[in-house]
Amino acid sequence: MSNLKNNSSKNIINLTSTKSKDVKKNEIKKSILKSKIDYSKLSKKDLDNVQLDVLNLTQFKSLRKNKDNVSKKKLVSVKRDMYNSTIFESIDIKNNVIQLDRKKVRKQIRNKRNKFVNNILFYFDNNQLNDLKSSITSFNIFYKDVYTLNDYSLKSIASNNSDKETLKDLKQFLFIMKNRKQIIK
């Protein structure tokens, strides 16, 4: 329990290192919420260990201001199982070069998803609530039309072979999407 009261970033950021039988998840969340860590000054290593689901909105905003949190964009391959089958039906009927066309469509979907992610993170960082609200609404329509799993999980919009930078942006994006009602009042 004394580890929780200690405000060093290592004890608070890496929740997996505090796995004690006596420590409950709620106590960990309370200690993190009470902590006065400046997330905007954490090292890149510490940023990777931050558990987003225990942060409040203020701590998340501080995290987004961190210079090491800015990611470089890379395209990755995505399995088609995560997409609705209706997207590929017109391709299957039209021609025999199905695999190339599917790959092209998946790339277009990823690019569109990445544009939504970048825009929403940008609007959130700059407190542009009207633009943020309209982008969230547009993304929700896109999300329900394109993806089979609609639970705002990382698994629903990214594959296992995605690069770390993309996954970091997606995690932060999903945090905003899950908390959009608190953010936009």
Image (tube, grey):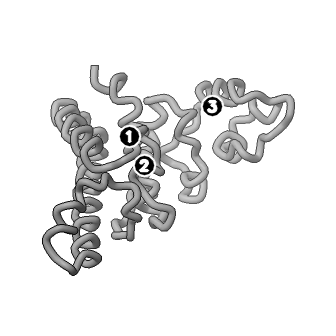
Image quarter (top left, top right, bottom left or bottom right) of the N terminus: top right
Which of marks 2 and 1 precedes in the sequence? 1
Mark 3 or 1: in front is 1
Which of marks 2 and 3 precedes in the sequence? 3
Q: Is residue 12 above or below residue 90?
A: above
**3D distance between C-alphas at marks 3 and 1:** 29 Å
Disc 3 designates what residue? 32
Mark 3: amino acid? Ile
* Callout 1 touching callout 2 (CB < 8 Å): yes
Mark 2: amino acid? Ser
Residue at the spot 49% in from the left edge and 29% down from the top edge: 56
Mark 1: amino acid? Asn
Residue at the spot 59% in from the left edge and 27% down from the top edge: 33
The image position of residue 96, as x and y in percent, is: 20, 79
Would you say 112 lies left or right of 60 here?
left
Disc 2 designates what residue? 156
**The residue tagged with tag 1: helix, strand or loop?**
loop
